[in-house]
Image (cartoon, rainbow, N blue to C red):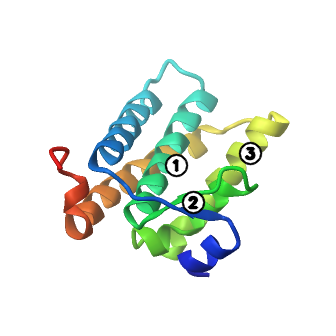
């Protein structure tokens, strides 16, 4: 499905990104990644921090392409992850893994399922890779959003 189709069914809204908001999201993602590395925190908290970094990168991808999720519509996290191929060029195999991490987060949040150490490692690793890919994509495709003086 295209971004325009998601707009038509109210999963997305139009948005004009600014360099300042993109920089704030990238900085927040970096802070969340740092938090996810704190060994004294619970696996659930570390997983949540890494997952939040993934969501912040996905938000940057949408914003850089002129959209933002409709947060009043159910499934906006799923939409954000599943559009990563369209927004940041993320391989389908990768966003499928990210979507499985989303499902794991939901099970933890709403059913109390435990987060295993392997899931924490996977989420942190994928968040690090996505943040790197987000920065590379911005540099190549939207360098105007990396310059906060505009």
Asked if marks 1 and 3 touch (Cβ < 8 Å), the reply is no
Is 78 on the left-hand or right-hand side of 37?
Answer: right
Number of other residues with Cα within 10 Å of mark 3, as a class: few under 14, some 14 to 19, many 20 or more: few
Instruction: Return the disc, 3 or 2, that comes first in the chain's sequence.
Output: 2
Q: Is residue 99 in view from this perspective? A: yes
- Quarter of the picture containing the N terminus is bottom right
Q: Residue at x 72, y 57 (%)?
A: 75
Pinpoint residue 35: horizontal percent, then vertical percent.
43, 28
Q: CA distance from mark 3 to mark 2?
A: 15 Å
Residue wearing tag 2: 80
Number of other residues with Cα within 10 Å of mark 2, as a class: few under 14, some 14 to 19, many 20 or more: many
Q: CA distance from mark 2 to mark 1?
A: 7 Å
Q: Which label is found at residue 90?
A: none
Pinpoint residue 115: horizontal percent, then vertical percent.
68, 38
Give the structural element (helix, strand or loop) at label 1. Answer: helix
Number of other residues with Cα within 10 Å of mark 1, as a class: few under 14, some 14 to 19, many 20 or more: many
Give the structural element (helix, strand or loop) at label 3. Answer: helix
Q: Residue at x 57, y 60 (%)?
A: 80
Q: Which label is found at residue 106?
A: 3
Q: CA distance from mark 1 to mark 3?
A: 14 Å
Residue wearing tag 1: 55
Is label 3 or label 2 in front? 2
Q: Residue at x 36, y 44 (%)?
A: 21
Instruction: Return the disc, 1 or 3, that comes first in the chain's sequence.
Output: 1
> Which of 29 and 61 lies nearest the eye of the viewer?
61
Q: Residue at x 66, y 64 (%)?
A: 11
> Which of 82 and 119 lies nearest the eye of the viewer?
82
Asked if marks 2 and 1 touch (Cβ < 8 Å), the reply is yes
Image vertical order of residue 106 relative to residue 13, above or below: above
Give the structural element (helix, strand or loop) at label 2. Answer: helix
Image vertical order of residue 48 relative to residue 77, above or below: above
Residue positioned most to the right: 111
């Amino acid at each position: 499905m295209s971004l325009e189709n998601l707009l038509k069914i109210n999963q997305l809204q139009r948005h004009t990104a600014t360099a300042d908001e993109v920089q704030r999201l990238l900085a927040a993602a970096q802070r969340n990644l740092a938090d996810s590395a704190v060994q004294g925190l619970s696996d659930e908290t570390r997983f949540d921090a890494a997952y939040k970094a993934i969501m912040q990168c996905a938000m940057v991808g949408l914003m850089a392409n002129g959209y933002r999720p409709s947060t009043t519509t159910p499934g906006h996290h799923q939409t954000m992850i599943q559009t990563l191929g369209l927004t940041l060029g993320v391989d389908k195999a990768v966003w499928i893994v990210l979507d499985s991490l989303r499902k794991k987060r939901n099970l933890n949040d709403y059913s109390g399922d435990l987060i295993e150490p392997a899931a924490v490692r996977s989420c942190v690793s994928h968040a690090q890779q996505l943040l790197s890919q987000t920065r590379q994509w911005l540099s190549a495709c939207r360098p105007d959003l990396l310059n906060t003086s505009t």
